Image: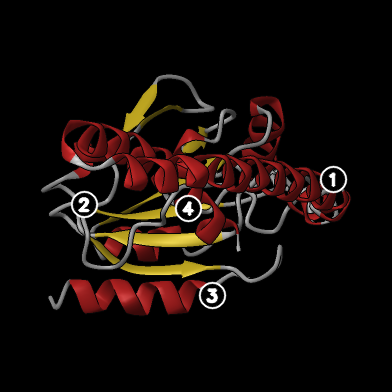
Amino acid sequence: LQEDYPRFEEVDSEILAVSVEDATIGQHVSELLEIQYPILSDIEHKVADQYGVYNLLGDSLATPSVFLIDMEGIIRWAYVGQSSADRPSDDTILEQLRGLNPL
Amino acid sequence: MTDRLGVTRDKNPAHATGWRQTRAGGESGAMMNGKRALIPVLMLIVCAAILVTYKVAAVNTISATPTPTQTPRPVPTTTPRPVEEPASVAPTVGEPAPDFTLPSVEGGAVTLSDYRGQKNVVLLFYRTGG
């Protein structure tokens, strides 16, 4: 995602990465990869619960998942991983975003 | 069986008192004697009915005792069920995204609805471990 971040900016999109893990781990990752988009700490997994992705794999972590929310605040696309490594590719997400913004 | 006996037990005393009153009021002595002879018989039936009812009740409690030994069997299978699982319902496509404010690792807080009318949001739940 980091390498493709400019491509997300092109389609008027912000990436918000949410982790239920300890913030220090998140910060470590953030520094390590110099991630440009916000990494949000959801230690109490409230947001993960809101989106129904917490502990789906039974490991007390958020299931890897992506929700595309348009400018109206409506969820337009969702992908919830079936395993810890199951994630949609950047291209898939970008494709969906372009579908939201036919510019 | 129990119902029948219960019915006869209930009805008989009522009939007996009813007969006593009406017969004593206007009927002849011969009729009175015939009815008086009936009363002990009725009393016996009532007693028999009570006895049978108690026996049936006793049998019920005895037969009810083995049932609890059968009942606990399903209970253990039901008890371990409460496994901690999220009861939350995932929002579906087309619905408004649940708003939230979360602290950013870089500092400050981020609120989802702040992006409304500004940008699309790629909300990404991720994990560092494998």
- In-front residue for pair A58/B122: A58
Q: Dot 3: few (<14), some (14–19), or many (≥20) neighbours within 10 Å?
A: few
Q: Are marks 2 and 1 on the same chain?
A: yes
Q: CA distance from mark 2 to mark 1?
A: 69 Å
Q: Which residue is mark 3?
A: A89
Q: Which residue is mark 4?
A: B8
Q: Is residue B36 left or right of residue B26?
A: right
Q: CA distance from mark 2 to mark 4?
A: 84 Å
Q: Chain of mark 4?
A: B
Q: Dot 4: few (<14), some (14–19), or many (≥20) neighbours within 10 Å?
A: some
Q: Is residue B11 left or right of residue A69?
A: right
- Is residue A102 among what the camera can see? yes
Residue B110 in the image, given as x and y percentages of width and height: 35, 30
Residue B74 in the image, given as x and y percentages of width and height: 78, 56
- In-front residue for pair A48/B40: B40
Mark 2, mark 4: which one is toward the viewer? 4
Q: Dot 2: few (<14), some (14–19), or many (≥20) neighbours within 10 Å?
A: some
- In-front residue for pair A100/A52: A52
| Displayed quadrant of residue A12 | bottom left
Q: Quadrant of the C terminus of chain A?
A: bottom left
Please tell me which residue is depicted at 35% across the width and 41% down the height of the picture.
Answer: B32
Q: Tell me which numbered mark, 2 or 4, is placed earlier along the sequence.
A: 4
Q: Dot 1: few (<14), some (14–19), or many (≥20) neighbours within 10 Å?
A: few
Count of residue discs:
4
Q: Amino acid at mark 2?
A: Lys
Q: Amino acid at mark 4?
A: Thr
Q: Are marks 1 and 4 in contact (CB under 8 Å)?
A: no
Mark 3, mark 4: which one is toward the viewer? 4
Residue B43 in the image, given as x and y percentages of width and height: 57, 39
Q: Which residue is mark 2?
A: B119
Q: CA distance from mark 3 to mark 4?
A: 82 Å
